[in-house]
Amino acid sequence: MKVRGIICAALLAVLSGIGCGYHVAGKSDELPKTIHVIAVPALENKTTSYRIEQKFTSATIHEFLVRTSYRVVSNPENADAVLRGKVLSIEAVPLTYDTASGRATTMLVQVKCEVTFEERATGKILYHSDNFVFRNEYELSTDVPSFFQEQDPALERVAKDFASRLVAAVTENY
């Protein structure tokens, strides 16, 4: 009986060490081992949304710091790799309405960007997309015009969700 228990314990240890190949998004470390410091200069704003580039840049820096082991700087001269981007468009479209008031209750937000991630020493492009599109649904607690006001927490949520997807794309899809 003791031998069977030892065999079962050994078998369980071996089986638990075998991975299925999946990993949590945003936790992968697929970039070249020479990259330790990433520069994230301010994104360019090609939209009419006030200060959206600041919110998206800040959220992207935060996401790199929280989800990866890379050090993040703003000056490309002090980095091993540089992430540059342009916010090309942002749109919010009502998806559902409150039947009593006729007001939108859920919005579909779509952000389109151009993104380039380049290894500075070699000039090698590690990731590039002319059409990096982020889409997500958001419930509204207020009316549509206030959705994108400067202090609205909805824009902070969009920036955080966008940054999470961008960092995962850059670090995992290279």
Image (cartoon, rainbow, N blue to C red):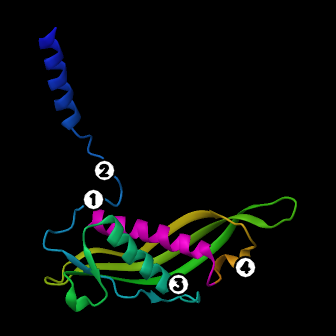
What secondary structure is found at the residue carrying circle 2? loop
| Residue receiving disc 4 | 145
Q: Magenta stretch?
A: 150-174
Query: Could you tell which of marks 1 and 4 lies nearer the N-terminus?
Result: 1
Local packing at callout 2 (Cα closer than 10 Å; few below 14, some 14-19, many 20+) is few
For label 4, the SS is helix
From mark 2 to mark 4, how far is it between C-alphas?
A: 39 Å
Rendered residue at 37%/77% (across/down): 61
* Left or right: where 88 falls relative to 21: right
The x, y position of residue 101, in whole percent, is 86, 64
- Contact check, label 1 and label 2, Cβ < 8 Å: yes
In this view, the residue farthest toward the top is 1
Q: Which mark is residue 89?
A: none
Q: Quadrant of residue 18?
A: top left
Q: Amino acid at mark 1?
A: Ser
Amino acid found under the numbered disc labelled 4: Pro
**Where in the figure is residue 34, as x and y percent of width and height?**
13, 73
Residue at 73% x, 74% y is: 144
Residue type (three-letter) at the residue carrying disc 3: Ile
Asked whether residue 173 is in view, the answer is no
Viewer-side residue, 150 vs 117 = 150
Evaluate whether residue 125 shows in this view: yes
Q: Which of the labelled discs sits on residue 28, or is there none? A: 1
Q: Is residue 24 left or right of residue 160?
A: left
